[in-house]
Image: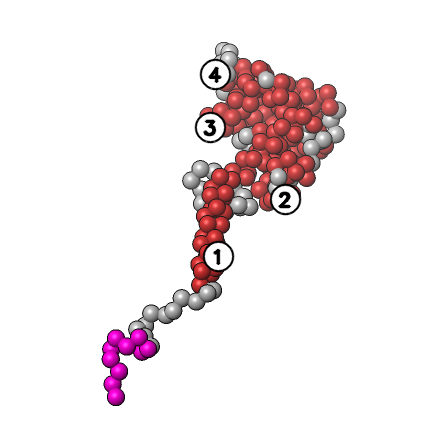
Amino acid sequence: MTRPVNDPGTPRTENAKPRTASEGPRAENAKQRVEDGKKRVEDGKKRGGGGSSRGPGRRPGPTATREKILAEARDLFAEKGYDGTSLRAIARAAGVDPALVHHFFGTKEGVFIEAMRFPVDPAVVLPRVMSFPRDRFGELMVRTFLDVWGDDERRAPILAMLRSAMTNERAATLLREFVSTVLFGPAAKITEAPKLQIQAAAGQMIGLMILRYVVRVEPLASATEDELIELVAPTIQRYFIT
């Protein structure tokens, strides 16, 4: 006997599944997870900057981190001097691991040179100069200065450094530390020249470069390199080799 189609006792054969008691809480939990995820993304954008999609905890890119290290290093060098500043202190101020500072710059001297924006690494140039015969040291020192200052691109950051030192005490402190410790420090160790003589040599060389390339005093500005070397090298030689 066939039952009527509309018989209320006939079970439904459609594919729709009946709603269970647990489906309501599960849906609510899923919705909450979605909301939590959206909140984490928004928090990450706020921490990482405007439109950034970085999640929380991610550090800035290598360029931003490098510049942060250099900025903190300048402050520490100006406040505590070269000898009073350590790589660990720089890393701590920048909020990074000391290994990262070492990765970017190698040594404290490397950080200092980068912080000063100096266009030549004295640690490379001075040993090369010092490898020449002692009786030619003054000549090679003057020639090296002329090579650096004679290049427009390399002269620009040095001039910026000097101008800043004339009007800003912090910049003047950095420049003093740079000249005495990094620029002429290695030469002093090799030659064992007294500190006063090292500073006199630095003053004479920097003064010569300013008069020649900045103030452009004649006939100093138009003199040939060989003329200047012949004139100044003997004095520089006497400062370092006694």
Residue 118, percent from left and from top = 56, 30
Crowdedness near tag 3: few (<14), some (14–19) or many (≥20) residues, C-alpha within 10 Å: few
Residue at disc 4, secondary structure: loop
Crowdedness near tag 1: few (<14), some (14–19) or many (≥20) residues, C-alpha within 10 Å: few
Residue under label 3, please give it: 153
Q: Which mark is residue 97?
A: 2
Lower sequence index among marks 1 and 2: 1
| Quadrant in which the C terminus appears | top right
Distance CA(mark 1)–CA(mark 4): 82 Å
Residue 124, percent from left and from top = 60, 37
Lower sequence index among marks 1 and 4: 1
Establish if 52 lies above or below 83.
below
Callout 4, which amino acid?
Answer: Ser
Q: Is residue 99 magenta?
A: no
Residue 119, percent from left and from top = 53, 31
Lower sequence index among marks 4 and 2: 2
